[in-house]
Amino acid sequence: MSLSTKRGSKGAGLQHKRTEKQSTICLQQMNVDSSNDEDVEKSSDNGTATHKDSDSKPAMTKKRKQPTECFLSQPEEKQETTVKAKKRKKKKISDILERSTPKPGIPADLQNLLSQHFCENRSVIEMEELKLSDSCFLPANDLTHSFSSYLKEICPKWAKLRKNHKEKKSVVMLVICSSALRCLELIKSMTAFKGDCRVLKLFAKHIKIKEQMNMLEKGVFHIGVGTPGRVKALVEQDGLCLDSTKYMILDWNWRDQKLRRMMDIPEIKKETIDLLEMSIIKLCREGSVKLGLF
């Protein structure tokens, strides 16, 4: 080969290398430019976003009205809960009785209780049969008597009645209380009145009904003190006969630890009314039994 051709090939090679370097440099510059363009676009996008945010401020204020509506609904719920809590407190008997002054029971109270209990299920004629005249009631306790002094007042001829009573399965006086503990308290408090008469416990606590029926069949008892549920069960099973009963005393005014009277307790109230409806109201209307509210 000639020198001119060698020089020409070398020159062509050098030009090729230069073009490759220039192309790589151009590519790097293009990448830098593209990255710069992306940064510029981002900044421009941020600018436009901020511009849009600044433009959309009234829309944000419109959206913020929704939590204010939710915030307004919360105090209404609190008010409802407070109202419900107040209603629950009003339903408690103890809260009502704490504010009310104690009043002695009168015959009208028992009569109203019977009418309220039976008015929905009884006819007018049947309701008239449940009414008791004032002559069916003994003098009510004015909250100044002890149990013995009250019994002495309503039954001044107790000694004669006690001597004449010789029938089994019956008592002359029947005392109805709300609980067994209250029965024991009244039995202890009547020592000045009862004298030598025999008192029988007629409640269900620790005493079986068969034992009470056996005692009534074998012995003569003058006073029975018990709960309405057990007395009602004895009457239904013919363990207790009320034909010889002259007095029925309801422990009307006494209140327990929760300030409830015996007619404020639903179970005791229902059992007492059932006992009255079973035979006591009929005997009262006939004049053989007198009701007393202690």
Image: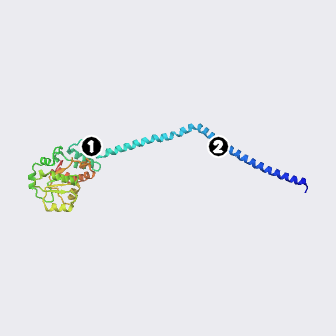
Dot in front, 1 or 2: 2
Which secondary structure, mark 1? helix
Task: State how far apart marks 1 and 2 are (Cα).
Answer: 76 Å
Q: Nearer the viewer, residue 25 or 279?
A: 25
Circles 1 and 2: CB atoms closer than 8 Å? no
Q: Is residue 153 left or right of residue 277?
A: left
Residue drawn at point x = 59 percent, y = 37 percent: 54
Q: Is residue 203 above or below residue 128?
A: below
**Mark 1 or 2, nearer chain start:** 2
Which secondary structure, mark 2? helix
> Which amino acid type corresponds to the residue marked 2 in the rendered image?
Lys
Q: Is residue 156 left or right of residue 11?
A: left
Residue drawn at point x = 80 percent, y = 51 percent: 17
Question: Residue 272, labelled with which disc?
Answer: none
Q: Nearer the viewer, residue 137 or 144?
A: 144
**Residue carrying label 1:** 98
**Residue carrying label 2:** 42
> Which amino acid type corresponds to the residue marked 1 in the rendered image?
Glu
Q: Nearer the viewer, residue 21 or 191?
A: 21
Q: Quadrant of residue 75?
A: top left
Residue drawn at point x = 16 percent, y = 61 percent: 215
How many numbered marks are there?
2
Callout 1: 10 Å neighbours few (<14), some, many (20+)? few
Residue 218 visible from this viewpoint: yes
Callout 2: 10 Å neighbours few (<14), some, many (20+)? few
Q: Is residue 224 above or below residue 44?
A: below
Q: Quadrant of residue 41?
A: top right
